[in-house]
Image (cartoon, rainbow, N blue to C red):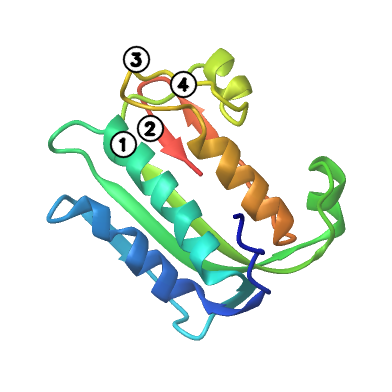
Amino acid sequence: MRRAPEQPVPASAPVQATAAAQPLGGEAASIVVPDASLFVTADPTQITQVLINLVVNARDAVSERGRILIEVDRVDLDEAYASKHFDVVPGHYALVSVSDDGSGMSADVLAQAFEPFFTTKSPGEGTGLGLSVCYGIVRQAGGHILLYSEPGQGTAD
């Protein structure tokens, strides 16, 4: 039986980011949180799932000495920004960024990254659902998710 989705509640963005870093174990990850009082209104379990998916993808993209950075901050999106990004409403948002210094993605891969079942991983290593699930959860919570990447330069979500 499918459980009903949780009701959105105030969730501590810094706490969710810290929880998402746990799959890295002792690996190189830095968390930057200038404002520990930042909350988002969403299902905390789903927000943690989004961050874990992003962190695991970053971990898989970096070499043994690679770096992963998780940043949480406030951002104000204005009319100019909203006019350049589909379905963005100007306002105050929590910015959660997961970036890495891994191999990066080509424009072709980047264009398909949120598609269900799209993966660049070898058979048996990934389902291709991670980023599409992230997209759905973030949009359902009234947020936006963007990817930036260049081959050889790493990726930022």
When the figure is inspected, residue 2 is found, relative to residue 37, above or below; the finding is: above
10 Å neighbourhood of mark 3: few (<14), some, or many (≥20)? few
Q: CA distance from mark 3 to mark 4?
A: 9 Å
When the figure is inspected, residue 124 is found, relative to residue 17, above or below; the finding is: above
Nearest-to-viewer mark from 3 and 4: 3
Nearest-to-viewer mark from 2 and 4: 4
Please state if 23 lies on the left or on the right of 116 as rendered. Answer: left
Q: Which residue is mark 3?
A: 123
Query: What residue do we see at 43% from left, 69% from top?
Result: 16
Instruction: Name which of mark 3 and mark 2 comes first in the sequence.
Output: 3
Decide: marks 2, 4 in contact (CB < 8 A)?
no
Instruction: Name which of mark 2 and mark 4 comes first in the sequence.
Output: 4
Query: What residue do we see at 47% from left, 25% from top?
Result: 150
Instruction: Name which of mark 1 and mark 4 comes first in the sequence.
Output: 1
Q: Which residue is mark 2?
A: 154
The amino acid beneath tag 2 is: Gly
Residue 6's image quarter? Answer: bottom right
